[in-house]
Every structure is written in C-alpha cells, then in structure tokens.
Amino acid sequence: MSANMLVFLSQEPADAKWGGNALVSFDAEGTTIHVPDDNQLAAVQRAGRKLDGQGIKQVTLSGEGWELESIWAFVQGHRNSKSTSEVQWPTLEQADEAELQARIQATNWVREVINQSAEVVRPSQLASRAGEFIKSLAPDHVTYKIVKGNDLIDEGWMGTYTVGRGSERSPAMLRLDYNPTGDADAPVHTCIVGKGITFDSGGYSLKPSGGMSAMKADMGGAAMATGGLALAIARGTNKRIKLILCCAENMISGRAFKLGDVITYKNGKTVEILNTDAEGRLVLADGLIYASSQKPEMIIDCATLTGAAKNALGNDYHALFSFDHDLAQRALMAASEEMEGLWPLPLAEMHRNMMPSNFADLSNISQGDFLPGASTAAAFLSYFVEDYQNGWMHIDCSGTYRKSANDKWSAGATGMGVRTLANILGDDERVEQTAE
C-alpha cells in the first residue's frame, strides 16, 4: 500500500526550476501548492485536479493554512468520476468539520447517482434511492410515497406517464415530506421539484449520438434537488419541505408519445407535442401542479432543461429564471455566499405567448427564428404554477455535469448547486441568526 502524499499550502512562489507561475512543486516532504493572492480557492481546486490527473490518488493535507473552504476546494478538484481519490485533512473546529462532512455526503450522493448509467439508475430506482437517502438523514421526520406506472394515470399525472410510457421501465413520481415540526398540519414552507429523466433519447425527435452520450445525466435536476434538501437538513433547517421528483425514461417504441399528441394536465391545461425532445418540461408540469396544491411559500424547480441555457452560460453557471425579483435576488445572494455559479436569464410575460398551438392551449416548444429557448421553456413551466409571479423560481442546471474534464473539474457530475439550494432553504434561519 502506497503512503499518502503530503500536500502543503504556501503564499511563496515556486522555485524558478518549476517554471514561471508554477502552481505546484515537489520535494522530499511532498508537494506544495503555491497559492496566488487572488482567486486562492480556484487555485487550490486546480491543484487538486492536477494531482489527481498525475495519478496521485492518496493525499494528506498538511501544515498551516488549511481551513474549511480551502479543504473543500481541494476535495472538489481531486475527486473524479471513478471514485478513486482519498483525501485526509487536519482537524477542524467541530462546526466546520460537520459542515465539510455534510457537503461531502450530499454531493457524493449527487455525483454518484448522476454518474451511474441509465441501466443502473432507472426511474423508479431514482425515486426510491432519493427517498431512502433523505429518510436516512432524519428517519423520524421523513415520509414518502412513490406513484408509478398506470397509477400515475389514476392520479392524473399525465405528463410523467406520457413521457415514460415508451420505455419498459415504468415512470415514477416521488412525493417526499420532510416535516421536523412534529405537527402534521404544519404549513409547507417550500416545495422542490426535480426533473428526473434517467435517460433521454429524444424520443421520435431523436438526438444525434453526440448529444445523447451524456443523457444518463438528464436527471441532474432531481439529483441536485435531493442533495440540496439533504444538505439543508444537515445544516439544521426547521422548515417543512416537500420534495417532488418526476422520473421517466424518454425512449422510442410503439407505445412512445408522438408529435401531434395532446396531453391534458390535471389543472386543465392542454399541450400539443411538437418536439418529443422537449420532454423535461412535460414531466415538471406534473410536479409543479402538485407543488402548487400544497400552498407553499416558495416553489423551486431544478432541471437540466435546455441546451440554450448551457450554450449561454457553459458549465460554470446554473441559469436562474423568476418573475419574483426579490426571490431571484435571494437566490443570487445565496449562490454568492456559497461561491457557486448562478446567473439570471430573462423571463417576462411576452415569453408566455411564444408557444402557440392550433390544437391545444399551448405547444411544448417555441416557434419561429431566434427565439429564446431557455426563457420560453421557463415560461412554459409558469402555466403549471398557481401563482407564478410570486414565490417561484426555475433553475436550469447547466453545470451539474461535464462531458469532459477541465483544469478544475473531472469529467462527470460536479455536485454544483447543492450548496446554493441548501442556503436558499435555510435563508430564514440565517437571517434570524444574523439579527441576533
């Protein structure tokens, strides 16, 4: 068994023999990360990625300068999709150690479930794994129900059923209730809705192979929603929160939904299908209808919804949409506090009129040249939120998965957004503690 490599931090530049602006250097003791004055945490994360890329899998962070955020930055960079890295760190204060362990637990679950293949993570399994994960964190405060297959028809969840009916693997909806109040009649503070498309072929609007290769990760929104709730629970949120995951596999068969089909939703809205590859919004609609029925103060949906958002922001930011300016500002502040990427894209009343249909209330895609696909997707969702102008935000999760590695991240799932979501869910408690 090989010994762990010791890793030190230094404000001093590396010896010239290691090259100008060298990030890491090596000696008999181990390796030193030479941290610049600006953007220190990004440099530490890049160093973690560099060491993992060199095959240095077992490390011990040693010496001075290692604190919660620098340790977290290194762990983020050193982790990889094959789960072969091992990092040890100096003793932290109890609160910081608890926070670090909670982040690792939540994001490890998210990364693992996204990175696993669609043969392993089926719709009903995604729902059950998420339910069991959250229940394991607070057994006395969590209950959940999974509705799947034809039972979705009986309850009126036609979006999820329709998208998933073409697959041999049944679609499923998870409805989880985290209620730490002890009062069965306590009001629901937040509903989180996650898109759980465990594989997206595009359906009859078939994706090319290059666009399909990463579609095991099309349930990244459901994973992020689950991880965000998990971290919020670990941080001690005392709010009643409901998690709704709409899970399906979008496949081609004689039973698959087709262009020209019309879905009638539980709230009475009818939707004409003009592109079967715009399926995420169809399942999210069910979740948002259910969330609205719970009369929460806030609804958040998380989804890897559009290529347009990823084209606009790349992998380093999630896209934020909301008609509620104050809520959007809270979310942006939360992302800033957690040092994660979140950026607002436009959402206005005009976007709600860009999905006309000759046969239904609306179609599932915008029509015309140069239309803003990410904004119209968000606008589509607004038709299924009872009070869409207040207390609702949509996060298009552009950064949950990377097809290739860069200097900070390995290929695969990132766990990005989990901290931001947990921060939003704990916002009221944070404000109260600050006031005290």
Image: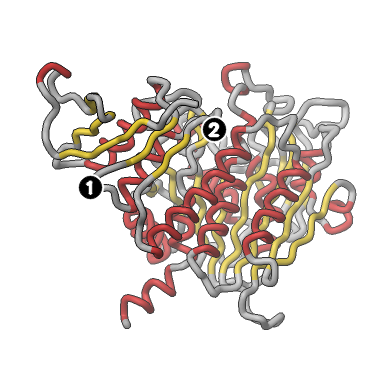
Of tags 2 and 1, which is closer to the observer?
1
**Observer-nearest of 384 and 191:** 191
Measuring from the top left, give residue 78's x and y in whole percent.
41, 33
Q: Left or right: 268 with respect to 392? A: right
State whether residue 137 appears in this view: yes
Residue positioned 67% across, 31% down in the render: 200
Residue positioned 71% across, 55% down in the render: 132
User: How many numbered callouts?
Assistant: 2
Going by the numbered disc 2, the residue's amino acid type is Ser
Label 2 sits on residue:
83
Residue positioned 14% across, 41% down in the render: 37
Measuring from the top left, give residue 344's x and y in whole percent.
38, 49
How far is disc 2 from disc 1 in space, using C-alphas? 27 Å
Going by the numbered disc 1, the residue's amino acid type is Glu
Label 1 sits on residue:
64
State whether residue 313 appears in this view: no
- First in residue order: circle 2 vs circle 1: 1
Measuring from the top left, give residue 376's x and y in whole percent.
52, 44
Can you tell which quarter of the image residue 122 is in? Answer: top right
- In the rendered view of the protein, which quadrant contains the C terminus? bottom left
